[in-house]
Amino acid sequence: MFRLSMAVMLAALMATSAVAAETRIGVVDLRQALFSSSDAQAFSEKMQRDFAGEEAKVREAQEAARKLQNRLEKDGAMMNDSERNKITAEFQEKVKEFNFLKQRLDSAVANRKQQFLEDARPGVDAAVQELLEEHDLDLILPSEAVVYVKPDMNLTDELLEKLER
């Protein structure tokens, strides 16, 4: 019985190896190709313009909190309790403001990036399909899932060219 199961496993392994040897695989770095595209560059510039005001507010709140903290560290021992409590409350309020503004900005940026990715998805899918057909591939893997790839099987530059069209 043991020999029979070993023979079946060996046969299955050999069949799998034969299929794997015939499978043609390509690799792409989707993130690199997508974010190197001219559309992504234009998107990035627009994001910087759109969120410049919010980024300035975040920096201002951070700087105000830092100044209050420095004042407390430097002069706190010489202040009376009332003044120290007032500055401490102002500091805590600035930290809350900073955290709120930063979280709101991060969320807005993440939402905008997600929308960009969703809008770009059909173009990326079409470009990947073209690569499959042009190179007669059975499979294209993301580079994150691959330990090593021969340079001729890395199709990232070709994907970028297709995205630029």
Image (spheres, rainbow, N blue to C red):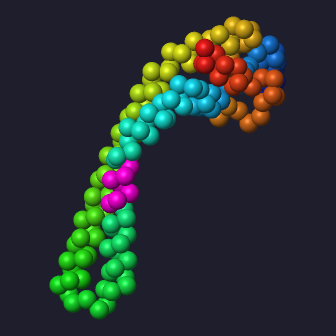
Quarter of the figure with residue 5 = top right
Quarter of the figure with residue 87 = bottom left
Q: Is residue 80 above or below residue 24?
A: below
The total of numbered circles placed on residues is: 0
Where is residue 26 shown, x and y percent of the image?
Answer: 73, 21
Where is residue 73 shown, x and y percent of the image?
Answer: 37, 82
Q: Residue furthest bottom?
A: 78
Say whether residue 90 is left or right of residue 3: left
* Nearer to us in this view, 83 or 5: 83
Residue 92 visible, this orientation: yes
The magenta stretch spans residue 57: yes
* Nearer to us in this view, 147 or 131: 131
Where is residue 118 shown, x and y percent of the image?
Answer: 45, 23
Q: Is residue 34 above or below residue 52?
A: above
Residue 142 visible, this orientation: no
Where is residue 129 shown, x and y percent of the image?
Answer: 62, 11
* Nearer to us in this view, 131 or 69: 69
Residue at left 45%, top 21%? 119
| Dominant SS in magenta | helix
Residue at left 24%, top 83%? 84
Quarter of the figure with residue 124 = top right
Residue at left 31%, top 86%? 76
Residue at left 33%, top 86%? 75
Say whether residue 26 is left or right of residue 98: right
Quarter of the rendering occupied by the N terminus: top right
The magenta stretch spans residue 66: no
Q: Which residues are magenta?
A: 55-61
Q: Residue furthest left?
A: 82
* Nearer to us in this view, 59 or 21: 59
Quarter of the rendering occupied by the C terminus: top right
